[in-house]
Image (spheres, coloured by chain):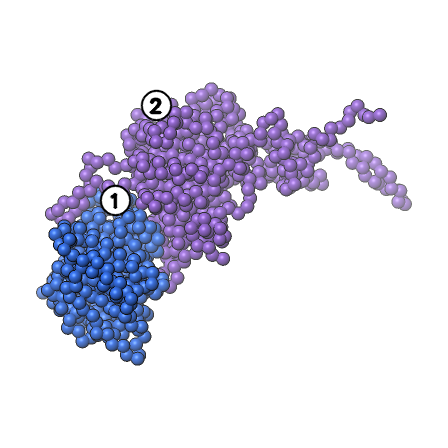
Chain colours: A purple, B blue
Amino acid sequence: MESKIRPDYNHQLSLKELPYIIRWDPAKCTRCGKCTAVCPTKAIEPAVFKQRIVISEGPIPTPSPVFKVFSGIKQVTDVERWCTGCNMCNMVCPNDAIMPEYNPQNKFLIHKNRGGYPYRRGGRRNDPSISTLDRLKFTRISMLTDPALDAQRHEFYIRTYIGRILPAEKLPLKIRKEDETLLVDDTVFVPPVREIFPIMIGSMSMGALSPRMWEGLMMGVAYLNEVENIPVVMCSGEGGVPPRLLKSRFIKYMILQIASGYFGWDEILHAVPHMKEDPAGIEIKYGQGAKPGDGGLLMAQKVLPLIAKIRGVPTNVDLPSPPTHQTKYSIEEAVAKMITSMSMVFGFRVPVYPKISGTKTAKAVLNNLARNPFASALSIDGEDGGTGAAYNVSMDKMGHPIASNIRDCYLDLVASGKQNELPLIAAGGVGKTGNLAANAAALIMLGASAVSIGKYIMQAAAGCLGDEYNRCNVCNIGKCPKGITTQNPKLYKRLDPEKVAERVVDVFKSANMELKKIFAPMGRSTQLPIGMSDGLSADDKAIADRLKIDYAC
Amino acid sequence: MCRLAAIVSEDYFSPFENILALETMKEGHDGSGLGLILRDLGGEFHDLKDYPILSCITSNKGYEVLKEYMSSKGFEVKYRWEPKTKIEPWMEITPRDHYIVKAYEYPDYMKDKSQKEKEDFLLQTRLELRKLGEKDESITVFSFWPDTITLKEVGDPLEVGLFFGLDHNESLKAKIIFAQGRQNTNYAINLYACHPFFIQGFFTMTNGENTAFVPIKEFLMSRKFPGYIGYNSDSEVFAHILHYTRHILNYPLKYYKDVITPMYPHELDSCNREDIETLRLMVKSLRMLTIDGPNCVIGCDRDNTVFMVQDTKKLRPGVVGGVRGKIGLMSEVCGLTSAIPDRDTTKDVFPMKYDFVYVKPGAKEIKIWNQKLGQTTTISYH
């Protein structure tokens, strides 16, 4: 006769199905309970175990089994409470008694769709293979035919431009014959252009990030500009900025983003008459590399009063931005109007440019923008870009790698002679494995005028735990164990904004030096080597051919 | 490193003077080539100033092709000069079939055309000839312009000079002569890689290496100007930038300095010039033409102003000096001393970071335009 309580082995998971398996050492564990308290997904819980021990107490061996009960830690096998591998348990454990271990045989994605909801998460594309950017090397070294430069002592000029640059033929110049001097005819409009450091902090919204993280980034950026003379700019992401910042002089270091939800723009527009400085630029977000075709998403858990106020929405509601701007009809009309309107808001004194996700159609977008005299740049976000919240399938399977996308666009501009008119900003996977300056320099030599970083700065400045093995990646549910992507004060109090700022400064000072160490042996110092493709080689023939650079082995 | 010897004189002189200057500077070049451009011609070309002169090298086959092509275009030979070449056993020169310097009459249909139309026509003809002979290397054409002769050959400059018979030469003289020793060895040995480079009346020669070559080349080629082709040497871009600055943008000559070596914003902030706003715009629009040397450029404008300009990385500058009526612009002092030994060396000019040094025809004085101060200093010879 069958038992009435037949276990359902078909629908019960074992630890082997989960992406991370907790290794816990009962001998080291002091049962302090810190690990279970800190676990963001409650993947571990206190448990009671029964243990069989064989003992022998007499003068001669008389082994006999006894059963002992003890408390400990147990990993749950509920797929909704999976261990994310964040390693916070290990971080708080006084005895190193616990640690998650990656399980390459996991079947997590097969099971993580309960209730018909596909897996959603934050983070990046879970692909730990070597990226194209890391397969590029700098192979044109100045040797004997011309001297290499000294990165420490030589004068370098590592700056770039964001803004529509007029071709020399169209500059409003007139010659004063008497002394052969060229003077500017100031009755003619010249589009605004900003000179910035070529690595910028990409769009991460206040809402996606905790207030402390955002504050730390902004403090670091201000310090870099005002003390270190490294003009780094940061993009706000969609969701506005605090009114006090809008009205401060520091707004000049910020690119304001407007996206399809227009969140935060009510506050911004009201602040415009009171602004002391113009922002560095306006980014119109049409797409994002991590989740092409999706709009932004701030989940209800993160819409707490501060965010609700800045965005002008009620608290605790999901804030999905539409996948595209609702006013968008075509690039020739609606996008052009959007660019013109945003330019008009700031009196045509601020560069306005669109951001799109990496796509095969980027060249078509580019060609249209090249014909729009107010388009100030094009930012392309490749598939390795990060996000605070998206469907896993979008992150892992949608999008275009940045290297060939930026190269194609640059060569298109070269073909039309506009390579210096419309700057390209490359993003998505820059510094993915830590090679920030090398990846940035490679993209610049492929044709980018600047690069944007997001995940790198979160990891370097605040210790974000995410990686390409799906580690942590709970940015979407407001449970960031590091206090970076959460609006929960209990969590973000873990983060010291002063230390974030310090690390931001470290990152950019060190990237500045590393860029010099790359450019110096290549003999480049006076201008950013945009499009200097003869300096690059790939270690893969197919990549080299695709990017129209040399192959070196 | 290439060696450069330019001389500007009040009187006609022989290019052998430049070659001897190169010989003095021999320690610095590997003797793999000689390039000469003569401007403001004397000798046999003295009375032919208005006739375009074709300078090229051809094979026997190329000679016929060229003859036929020029005649089909309606050109008539006005005057022809060929060097009396002599090859000695010790010379490491492979003589070519024909070294051609021919002055032509414009075809009838071009005679009444505007100056600009004539200029474009000459360029177009040169480019077509180049194309005709490029594949089989049967025609190598250097210049086609009035009052200008170009001679080039691979080999030691002194040997090449002797080979061309320039040591006993009365027929080929000029008031401005540029000479460059050493073929471009960074790239393939090719006659088209040999300086000076010429385009529509402008020419330059350079030493050093231009590490920004590829972006500059791509920028120039994308201007879609027919003459911006070639680039067998990274130095060819300097001639084309001069042409672009002067002929396409119509900037005064001194702005060539601001195009290839612009000042940084912090330098502009403390600059005395009245045209700072112009410079701020120019540096952005012409960012792709900023050179990243070290390079020393010696050039000649259409109006025969000869100049020297360098970038900040050129730690050993070139030198400009001379006597009244004869001024040399050289890459080394020993070359200048060889060409003009009896000069007052205290008046020699070593162009620094902000300097644009130029000499007007007649060689009466040296002028130094300081890019930062916006002032000109004159070194006069009495």
Q: For mark 2, does the 10 Å Cα neighbourhood hold few (<14), some (14 to 19), or many (20 or more) residues?
A: few
Residue A444, image x and y in percent?
40, 47
- Residue at position x 30%, y 36% from top? A373
Residue B285, image x and y in percent?
28, 44
- Residue at position x 81%, y 35% from top? A67
Please tell me whether residue A493 is drawn above or below residue A436 in the rendered image.
above
Q: Toward the viewer: A9 or A450?
A: A9
Q: Tell me which amino acid carries mark 1.
A: Ala
Give the mark nearer the N terminus: 2 vs 1.
1
Q: Residue furthest top?
A: A314
Q: Quadrant of residue B173?
A: bottom left
Residue A155, image x and y in percent?
33, 52
The C terminus of chain B: image quadrant = bottom left
In the image: residue A393, left or right of residue A148: right
Counting labels gives 2
Per the model, the C-alpha gap separating discs 2 and 1 is 38 Å
- The chain under label 1 reads A
Q: Secondary structure at mark 2?
A: helix
Residue A2 can be seen, yes or no: yes
Image mark for residue A270: 2
Residue B105, image x and y in percent?
15, 60
Q: Toward the viewer: A491 or B92?
A: B92
Image mark for residue A168: 1
